[in-house]
Image: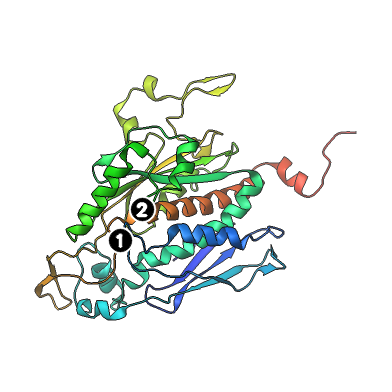
Amino acid sequence: MDNVGILFQFNSYGESHGSGIGGVVNGMPSGIYIDESFLKVEIMRRKGGAKFTTPRKEEDDFEILSGVFDGYSTGMPIGFFIPNNNTRSKDYSQIKDVFRPSHADFTYHHKYGIRDYRGGGRSSARESVARVFAGGLAKLLLREFHIEIFSGVSGIGEVCSTNTFSIEDFKEARNSEIFALDKTLEKAQKQEILTAKRRGDSVGARVAICVTNVPIGLGEPLGYKLDSILARDLMGLNAVKAVEIGDGIQSSRRYGSQNNDYMDKNGFLSNHSGGILGGISNGNRIIITVYFKPTPSIFVAQNTLDIYGNEVMLKLQGRHDPCVGVRGSVVCESIVALVMADMLLLHTTSKLSNLQKIYGINTTLS
């Protein structure tokens, strides 16, 4: 059940220590220029190998297998493959029969009766490279409509910003090693990550996402609302434990007179709703906040069980992100792109007049 999307569909395959990670994107209209340089930049933004991320460094060279001819999408399924070249499976031999605390080991074992223990197999964050590639394809479609998506880290552990971020803040965050949105807190946030890393521990993170130039009308009530699908697909990313749209939890602490987005002839006077009303985009910027738990792979001794029910003490080896939310911010951006591309295509059938334009039917009365 890895399919997401209705008209713009994405499906991934592969495991952390398998041959590689790949996917198929269905629904990309023909005639879109497939900018491979752009796709490489997207994947590079997600890569590990820096001191604030996992030491595992994959080249992430990709191969497009189908759906592209002479540099343009053909309207056929776009298949792609990204090989795994830097696996160290021996690091995981000690946990072959042991459940790592707060990992998916326990649930995968009991659901399927078999699991790939090497790096978490399918439950590994390694899978997210496919989402970034597919999200890059979605962005190529969205930019034809001037829709842009930005992301950045607003909090690391207890070091969290209360700022409202501008588009310039999001653009500047791309130059930060940890994609920090608040420059005044970046040093302290980096220190928070490094302190956890030195202790063999990990730390959680908060990520902000902003979508601009969104047309009014995206979203399919009641079963496929824009906000509900954004939350669903973002929660589908490993380590995400909560998603807020607009002011989110803060809205529950207010009166309606404080929370309503009043309007005048120039538009909305505020954006507490985060750009979505009734599950439909209202033309405002879409604002999302995503919360990541600390990476469960830590290097301190932990009490756990083995597959036989015995109590054991576990001390992990391997290469892990001290703060998965840093690279996770890039993946969140890609997931939002996939949802927005799907909603864009779905909106074409919402009105009879839209269909008539597609088929060149002139409805003007003679």
Q: Quadrant of residue 162?
A: top left
Q: Which residue is disc 1 drawn over?
A: 321
Direction from residue 92 to residue 13 in the image, left or right: right
- The residue shown at (29%, 39%) is 160
Q: Nearer the viewer, residue 225 or 32?
A: 32
Q: Nearer the viewer, residue 54 or 315?
A: 54
Quadrant assignment for the C terminus: top right
Where residue 235 sits: x, y (%)? Answer: 37, 53
Where residue 62 sits: x, y (%)? Answer: 54, 70
| Mark 1 to mark 2 CA distance (whole Å) | 9 Å
- The residue shown at (66%, 48%) is 144
Q: Which residue is disc 2 drawn over?
A: 326
Look at the image and name its color scheme.
rainbow
Is residue 198 positioned above or below 253 on the image? below
Q: Earlier in the sequence, mark 1 or mark 2?
A: 1
Is residue 75 positioned above or below 357 on the image? below
Residue 359 tag number: none
SS at circle 2: helix
Say if mark 1 contacts mark 2, CB within 8 Å: yes
